Image (cartoon, rainbow, N blue to C red):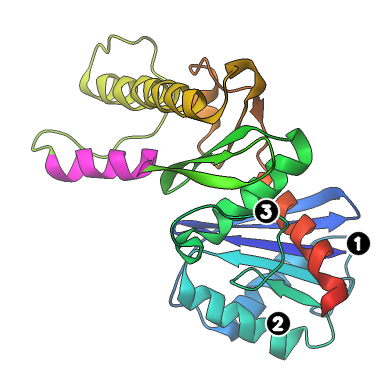
Amino acid sequence: MLLTIDVGNTQTVLGLFDGEDIVEHWRISTDARRTADELAVLLQGLMGMHPLLGEELGDGIDGIAICATVPSVLHELREVTRRYYGDVPAVLVEPGVKTGVPILTDNPKEVGADRIINAVAAVELYGGPAIVVDFGTATTFDAVSARGEYVGGVISPGIEISVDALGVKGAQLRKIEVARPRSVIGKNTVEAMQAGIVYGFAGQVDGVVSRMVRELADDPEEVTVIATGGLAPMVLGESSVIDEHEPWLTLIGLRLVYERNVSRL
């Protein structure tokens, strides 16, 4: 089976693939202080609970694919693959790794690995043109052309960042649970903040995507808008532009990139 690891700034998502099917997944906090040995123990604890895997670390794993937006974690995961999975082919997404998606930006090395991986999966699953909206630490909007090229995107503060900022900077405000309120017009401070987050971000998504669509294609109906990321469900029901929700888009992209590179290892 293939172990895929998507390291974000706030959370790390792990997925276990049996062929093209994701059979298990986990979500843990991203901690840049964890060492390779700590990460190995964590992986062993998670995977040891799965009936398809053996009791020893690495039993049943025949491939690993990793992308990370946190360089220090990528460094430690590289050490994990070397020390604990030495006989298992591993693909770490970084410059030089074959993705099959041309990157048409001023400096391709600036683009986060997860954003390219999302584009890979979007092209494979839905074709182009497409826009991927990823609700993570930042909310990112990534555009893929009709020819399957990554052409650029938009980065804005994410939902949790905005909630934290309100709690820190607002003298009479506090950090709240991100949840859908009873109505748009809040009857108390918490509901008013929740309404601002949920409906404010839905409006942002609709506005940004609508403008991107006009630049991406002559016919807006040709563009598929895909939502992913842990906080996507908060906005899905309120946005009018999202066509598809694929929570495991990045993990699927990692599987595809692994398959395109493993023969070269």
Residue 53 at x, y = what percent? 88, 67
Separation (CA) of disc 2 from disc 1: 20 Å
Of the two numbered discs 2 and 1 on the same chain, state the one appearing first in sequence.
Answer: 1
Separation (CA) of disc 3 from disc 2: 26 Å
Q: Quadrant of the N terminus?
A: bottom right
Residue 250 at x, y = what percent? 65, 50
Q: Amino acid at mark 1?
A: Leu
Q: Amino acid at mark 2?
A: Thr
Q: Does dot 1 land on a helix, a strand or a loop?
A: loop
Q: Residues within 10 Å of mark 3 (few under 14, many from 20)?
A: some
Residue placed most toward the observer, 25 or 229 = 229
Looking at the rendered structure, the number of numbered marks drawn on it comes to: 3
Characterize the magenta stretch by its predominant secondary structure: helix
Say which residue label 1 marks.
52
Q: Amino acid at mark 3?
A: Val
Residue 151 at x, y = what percent? 53, 45
Q: Which residues are magenta?
A: 156-169
Judge whether residue 237 can be spotted in this image: yes
As drawn, the residue found furthest toward the left would be 171
Say which residue label 2 marks.
81
Of the two numbered discs 1 and 3 on the same chain, state the one appearing first in sequence.
Answer: 1
Q: Is 23 part of what is drawn in magenta? A: no
Judge whether residue 48 can be spotted in this image: no
Residue 218 at x, y = what percent? 57, 20
- The image shows residue 255, relative to residue 74, as above or below, that is above
3 or 2: mark nearer the eye: 3
Residue 237: name its quadrant.
top right
Residue placed most toward the observer, 68 or 118 = 118
Say which residue label 3 marks.
101
Q: Does dot 3 land on a helix, a strand or a loop?
A: loop
